[in-house]
Amino acid sequence: MRNRLGESKRLFKILPKNMDESSGYRFLAIKACNMCGANSRHFKILGKRLNKSQGLKPNTKTGISVTVCQCKVCGLIFPNPMPVPLSIQQHYGVPAEKYWKSEYLNLKKEVISIDKDKWESKLGKIHSNFRSLDIGAGIGKHMLQMQALGIDAYGIEPSEIFYQKALEIAKIPENKLFNISIEDAEFTSDYFDFINFGVVLEHIYNPSNAISRAISWLKPGGKIYIEVPHARWLIGKIVNLSYKIRGLDYVTNLSPMHIPYHIYEFTPESFQLNAKLNNYQIQSISYFVCDTFLPDLFDALLKPIMKKTNTGMELSVWLTKTK
């Protein structure tokens, strides 16, 4: 999503001659960890990341690379300098069929079916005036799930193509879904009971500010769900080790300049320390193993290890507004 530099002076500064016209990026130097606020003295360089899929032999490929760093205080992983596209449509102005797998675009009833008891165990009793907000609504699938629960569902989606797709295939009303970024969105304070950041926060250039804005729109005691890439994913560590053994200065973390455009990976500590800055409590943290992207033989060995050691690919966090 597009970053509002005026709100981020504490975190970013524009590098001299930072415009790369061929790639359409501004490169911004990170001054402090976005989630915990630690200054750059606490950054550790992990390696380089190309602007394309690297594979096992990144040293044989040409392209633009950025340095990938990790905050030694909270474990947040991010590129430094940060490549910010001149327009959000440069990243997300692609056909939905190219960005998502075909099964995700399936909106049949069995795909969007939802367990009300399971949701109420997290959200509490869903009453007649219950309101939700989906940030980065995509094609509207989560909004359909909320509607199926009888919730007054709203959403924001900055990609014009994804927004139009949601109106077309999910039939989301235009007065419920807005083609705008979280940085530019405005909602009444204490308005929503639930806000969803499902696989979205890793795309936002100032995630701490995004959480802060969402908290302001949430009723006291309201809930936020966040699902993000896990900085301690076992498969990523294995691939990075294979690079290191061969003397390659590359890492597999992030994809800041190619699909799916991930610019952050998080740890539980990222949210535990950010909670002190943004006045929320962590209700629960869990881990999803997900795919290994390796042959089935490795799946059988590594998936149980990831489950036992909490080193799965995705991290999910439930937050509660405290004030």
Image (cartoon, rainbow, N blue to C red):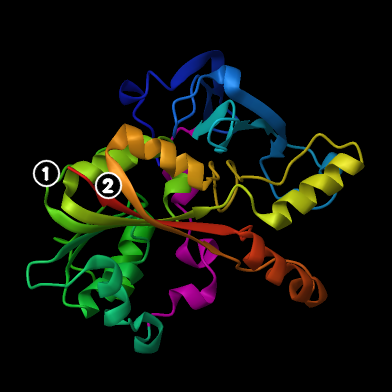
Residue at numbered disc 2 = 180
Q: Is residue 306 visible?
A: yes
Residue underneath mark 1? 189
Q: Residue furthest left?
A: 129
Left/right placement of residue 270 relative to residue 292 reads left
Image x and y of residue 100, in percent? 51, 65
Q: Is residue 165 left or right of residue 295?
A: left
- Check if residue 175 falls in the magenta segment: no
Q: Residue at x 34, y 35 (%)?
A: 276
Q: Residue at x 33, y 60 (%)?
A: 137
**Residue 25, position in %: x, y?**
53, 30
Q: Residues within 10 Å of mark 1 (few under 14, many from 20)?
A: few
Give the camera-side residue of 222 and 10: 222
Q: How many neighbours does mark 2 have within 10 angstroms: few (below 14), some (14-19), or many (20 or more)?
A: some
Q: Which residues are magenta?
A: 85-107
Whether residues under marks 2 and 1 lie with C-beta atoms below 8 angstroms apart, the answer is no
Q: Hey, what amino acid is under mark 2?
A: Ile
Tag 2's secondary structure?
loop
Name the residue type under label 1: Ser
203 to 18, vertically: above or below: below
- In the image, 178 versus 114, the foreground residue is 114
- Identify the residue shown where x is 69% and y is 38%: 49
